[in-house]
Image: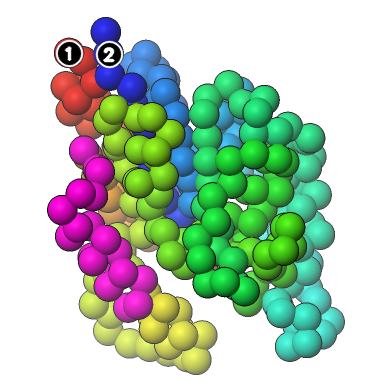
């Protein structure tokens, strides 16, 4: 009997499209995950896949996205917590996910978000899938935080870039993690503007947090995959087809390693 495979799909904005190609490769090889946990774009892809949406449909939806499909400018961003409204994003999730609940999913799935009030990680395990995905992918300052119960939720990647422990907690025997933003740890030649500087500061803090988490003795990751995706950035809706192809290649290149982990 094969061991239960869990996939931890990390954040990464546009680079998170790599997860779609990765899942496509696994599917072609007859490998189906027992469970999935996702953060940010990993939550979008993982949640849709767990709902039973065909991987080719997920690919077609994401690769056809244009900037204006999600950009909904707020006229008063400095008093409303974000540069953009979240109405377009919310409608996008509801259109494709509908009123699916976590309890309806074909594959056990969780996704992460961060509560601004308590500063704690929150795990969506029940309720509306669309709301969970929206909260997990709510980039702070860009999209309006999501109100849920007594919390104000933003992107789970703030505290949990790749939800490895959360995948293990779903019952996985083997955890394979895909980190789409290894590139943020690389040196750069210039910081051209204020936004670039702020992003760089966040990346420094994020990479240090990730380094410490992975250094913990009980970090439950059996295989960590970090695709390069040269030329694909987090915040630009372009080169998405390259991210997909790189994810597909990542899956194919690591099929033997994954099989070795899950087969007795």
Per the image, label 2 sits on a secondary structure element best described as: loop
Q: In the image, residue 186 lies at what x, y percent? A: 25, 71
Q: In the image, residue 184 lies at what x, y percent? A: 33, 68
Apparent side of residue 45 relative to residue 117 in the rendered image (left or right): left
- Which part of the image, by quadrant, shows the N terminus? top left
Q: Is residue 93 magenta?
A: no
171 above or below 226?
A: above
The residue shown at (35%, 46%) is 165
Magenta span dominant secondary structure: helix
93 above or below 135?
A: above
Are discs 2 and 1 less than 8 Å apart at CB? yes
The residue lying furthest to the top in this view is: 1
The residue shown at (51%, 66%) is 120
The mark found on residue 2 in the picture is 2
Residue 41 appears anywhere in the view: no
Q: In the image, residue 78 lies at what x, y percent? A: 73, 88
Q: Which residues are magenta?
A: 204-222
Please state which of residues 45 and 25 is positioned toward the viewer in this rendering: 45
């Amino acid at each position: 009997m094969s061991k239960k495979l869990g996939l931890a799909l990390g954040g990464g904005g546009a680079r998170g499209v790599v997860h779609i190609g990765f899942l496509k490769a696994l599917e072609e090889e007859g490998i189906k995950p027992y469970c999935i946990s996702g953060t940010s774009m990993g939550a979008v892809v993982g949640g849709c896949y767990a709902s039973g949406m065909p991987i080719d449909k997920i690919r077609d939806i994401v690769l056809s996205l244009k900037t204006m499909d999600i950009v909904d400018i707020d006229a008063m961003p400095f008093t409303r917590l974000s540069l953009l409204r979240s109405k377009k994003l919310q409608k996008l999730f509801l259109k494709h996910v509908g009123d699916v609940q976590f309890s309806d999913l074909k594959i056990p799935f969780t996704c992460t978000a961060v509560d601004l009030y308590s500063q704690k990680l929150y795990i969506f395990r029940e309720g509306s899938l669309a709301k969970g995905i929206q909260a997990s992918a709510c980039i702070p300052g860009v999209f309006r935080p999501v109100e849920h119960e007594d919390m104000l939720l933003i992107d789970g990647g703030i505290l949990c870039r790749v939800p490895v422990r959360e995948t293990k907690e779903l019952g996985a025997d083997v955890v394979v993690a895909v980190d789409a933003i290894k590139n943020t740890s690389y040196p750069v030649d210039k910081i051209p503007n204020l936004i670039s500087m702020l992003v760089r500061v966040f990346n420094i803090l994020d990479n240090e947090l990730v380094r410490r988490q992975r250094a913990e003795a009980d970090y439950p990751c059996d295989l960590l995959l970090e695709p390069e995706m040269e030329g694909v950035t987090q915040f630009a809706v372009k080169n998405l087809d390259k991210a997909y192809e790189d994810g597909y290649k990542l899956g194919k290149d690591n099929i033997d390693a994954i099989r070795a982990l899950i087969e007795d």
